[in-house]
């Protein structure tokens, strides 16, 4: 929401404010009256007076002792909600985004689309993808001591998960080998949930080829594993290096905090989850979201849908508050639409 109604600004204030914001977004440095005077028929003194009034209204500020101004977060929100004119992605950009999703498995398409969006926006691209049920390929154990073993689960997609599991007293290496062989031979290709049902059904019918206690150990482990994987978001982040541009050198602490925030996958996933209910793009500017209060980052995110119209994921970008909203907002929105079309095929 805008703290300052756009209608409260005179046309002169609005024009100068727009020029300051656009110049700041382009250059990343404070904007002085002389820079604005080169584009409008006003004296530098008149422009400084307008800038001062905009600052008193909380829309502009001046860092340190600089004579130039930069927009505040409230100012950027006013610009995005009331002044900005979006630039629809051009044909080349649209084709480039859609080409990344053509004739590829969904995981590869999502990864490529994230990288493409990152490159086009000069931000970090992020996608919260649908959760996938892992299918077993094989299971093996490495004995750690008399009461623990390291279980190594290999999924059909080649991913590997490791977990330390407790052992019942007296469990032998031979029993662990029997369990691993049973899982790999009888349960390969099943989801973790299906594998648990199969093990327990065979124990109940006394048809299991392994010790019942060992079978229950594996079933309990796979059940817990399944719940853990289901709760873990499938988050793709690409293009963090784009956040380190020429303007970043003046504020390395902020950039460092932003990169640290991107490492917290659970928190990033929660931010994107909040955009699932949005009709179009949801925009957070700086401290509007608690996660980015220190780094001054902005998030632009939009949901994308599956073949039945249900929201299945969220795509977006994370960058500095001075990112080019007019260009990036429609680009994120188009990417979400392209992902939806991909799911409908």
Image (tube, helix red, strand yellow):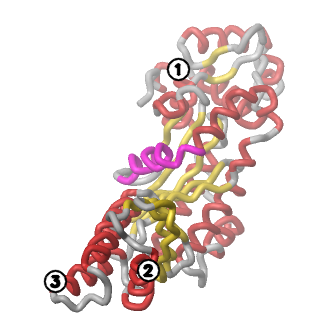
Q: Which mark, residue 204?
A: 3
Mark nearer the N terminus (1 vs 3): 1
Q: Residue furthest front?
A: 170
Local packing at callout 1 (Cα closer than 10 Å; few below 14, some 14-19, many 20+) is: some
| Residue 270 is a magenta residue | yes
Q: Is residue 85 magenta?
A: no
Q: Position of residue 59 (x, y in %)?
A: 57, 19
- Measure the C-alpha gap from mark 2 to mark 1: 80 Å
Picture coordinates of residue 108 (x, y %)? 60, 74
- Residue in front for this viewpoint, 74 or 250: 250
Q: Counting other residues with Cα less than 10 Å from the Cα at mark 3, is it few (<14), some (14-19), or many (20 or more)?
A: few
Residue 1: % across, % down? 41, 31
The rendered magenta stretch, by its main secondary structure, is classed as helix
Please indicate whether residue 46 sits to the left or right of residue 187 in the image: right
Q: Earlier in the sequence, mark 2 or mark 1?
A: 1
**Contact (CB < 8 A) between labels 1 and 3?**
no
| Residue 174 - label | 2
Count the labels in the image. Answer: 3
Residue designated by label 1:
9
Which segment is the magenta one? Answer: 263-276
Q: Residue at x 30, y 77 (%)?
A: 215
């Amino acid at each position: 929401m805008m703290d300052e109604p756009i209608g409260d600004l005179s046309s002169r204030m609005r024009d100068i404010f727009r020029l300051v914001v656009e110049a700041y977004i382009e250059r990343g440095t404070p904007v002085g009256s002389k820079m604005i005077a080169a584009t409008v028929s006003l004296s530098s003194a008149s422009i400084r007076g307008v800038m001062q009034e905009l600052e008193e209204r909380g829309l502009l500020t001046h860092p340190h002792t600089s004579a130039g101004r930069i927009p505040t977060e409230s100012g950027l929100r006013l610009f995005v909600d009331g002044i900005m004119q979006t630039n629809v992605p051009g044909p080349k950009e649209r084709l480039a985004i859609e080409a990344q999703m053509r004739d590829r498995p969904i995981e590869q398409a999502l990864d490529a689309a994230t990288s493409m969006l990152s490159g086009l926006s000069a931000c970090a691209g992020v996608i919260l993808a649908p959760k996938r049920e892992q299918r077993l390929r094989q299971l093996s154990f490495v004995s750690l001591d008399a009461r623990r073993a390291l279980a190594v689960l290999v999924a059909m997609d080649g991913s590997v998960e490791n977990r330390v599991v407790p052992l019942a007293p007296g469990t032998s290496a031979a029993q662990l080998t029997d369990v691993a062989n049973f899982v790999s031979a009888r349960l390969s290709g099943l989801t973790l949930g299906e594998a648990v049902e199969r093990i327990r059904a065979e124990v109940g019918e006394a048809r299991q080829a392994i010790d019942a206690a060992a079978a229950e150990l594996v079933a309990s482990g796979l059940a817990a594993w399944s719940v853990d994987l289901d709760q873990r978001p499938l988050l793709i982040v690409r293009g963090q290096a784009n956040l380190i541009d020429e303007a970043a050198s003046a504020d390395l602490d902020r950039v460092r905090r932003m990169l640290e925030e991107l490492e917290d996958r659970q928190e990033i996933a929660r931010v994107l989850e909040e955009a699932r209910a949005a009709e179009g793009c949801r925009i957070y500017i700086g401290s509007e979201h608690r996660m980015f209060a220190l780094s001054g980052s902005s998030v632009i995110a939009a949901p994308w849908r599956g073949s039945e119209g249900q929201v299945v994921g969220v795509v977006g970008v994370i960058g500095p508050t001075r990112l080019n909203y007019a260009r990036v907002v429609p680009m994120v929105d188009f990417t979400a639409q392209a992902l939806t079309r991909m799911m409908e095929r």
